[in-house]
Structure formats: structure tokens, C-alpha cells
Image (cartoon, rainbow, N blue to C red):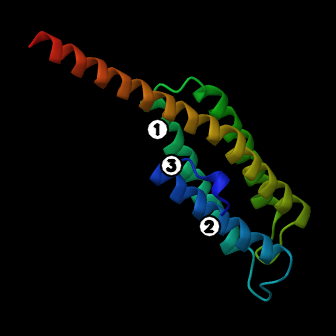
Amino acid sequence: MDAKYLLGIQEIDAQHSGIFAAMESLQKAAAGILQPQPVAPSLNKLRELLVDHFDYEESFMGSINCPELQEHKQKHAELRRLLETCVSTSSPTSIDDRLSRELGGRISEHLLEYDVKMGKAVESLVAQLRHHEVEEEFSADHRR
């Protein structure tokens, strides 16, 4: 996984890594590189990882009152629909290569655009907390 997808949030970075590995496996299966291995296990693994990731991310964003949460949820819903289209139109041994590539591209774009925004919101929150801590220390020192 390219470092540009890393946010510095350990759990989310680990999830991104797993998603990329699953996408790569699915794309190899779709291209016939893994034949005669079926496509279904790769697609199901990607589905499981994405659903877990989206749920975790939305919960995390809610816990920090991230202003982009609703927009992020909407983008997750769009990706879920595309994923379900891939699942419903694939057979145990094949998937539409065009759909597989579209899904991979849209997931990559989402991680770069929307997850990076979330990472910046977290950085801003951390900076605010640090600033607050410094102000508290300064204020406490002056009260003594």
C-alpha cells in the first residue's frame, strides 16, 4: 500500500492495508491470474473488510464530532451499493473485470479524498487539544 493512504491512525491504517490486499487479490482473481481459484472468497473478504471499515470509521468520526461525517456516510453508501452490484452480478468463479476495476478505483479515490479529510480533521483536533493543554499549563504556572 502506498504511504499516501496512511493517516497516522493505527487502526484505520491497518484496515486500509487489509482492504488494499483484498482488492489486489480480487483483481488478480478477476483477471484470471489466480485460476482455477474462485473469485467468491476474494470478493467476500473485500466485502467483509469494507463493511467493518465503514462501520468503524463512521463510529470514530461520530466520536470526534467530525464535520464531514454525513458526507462520508453518503460516500460509504455509494461504495456499498457498487460492492453489492459486484457481489450480485458475479458468479463463484468470475466477476466482471470492468466492475472489479471500477470498484478498486472508487475505493482508492475514496480513501485518498475522504479518508484523508478525516485524517486532517483528527490532526486539527489533536492540535487544538495540545494548544489547550499548553494554555492550561501556562495558566496553572501563573496561579502558583
Q: Is residue 70 left or right of residue 126?
A: right
Q: CA distance from mark 3 to mark 1?
A: 14 Å
Mark 2: give few (<14), some (14-19) or many (20+) Cα within 10 Å. some
The image shows residue 68, relative to residue 89, as above or below, that is above
Three-letter code, disc 1: Phe
Q: Position of residue 7 (x, y in %)?
A: 56, 47
What residue does disc 1 label?
60
Marks 2 and 3 sit apart, C-alpha to C-alpha, by 24 Å
Numbered disc in front, either 1 or 2: 1
Number of other residues with Cα within 10 Å of mark 1, as a class: few under 14, some 14 to 19, many 20 or more:
some
Label 1: element kind: helix
Disc 3: which residue: 8
Residue at the location (47% across, 25% down)?
A: 65
Which residue is more in the foreground, 96 or 127?
127
- The span from disc 1 to disc 2 (Cα, nearest Å) is 22 Å
Tell me which corner region of the image, top left, top right, bottom left or bottom right, holds residue 103.
Answer: bottom right
How far across and down, in percent of the image, does residue 42 sit? 68, 72
**Circle 2 residue:** 45
- The picture quadrant where one finds residue 39 is bottom right
Residue occupying the far top of the picture? 143
Question: Residue at (68%, 32%) from the top-left corner?
Answer: 74
127 is higher (above) or lower (below) than 103:
above
- Which callout, 3 or 1, points at the residue further toward the start of the chain? 3
| Quadrant of the drawing holding the C terminus | top left
Residue beneath the point at 64% across and 59% down: 47
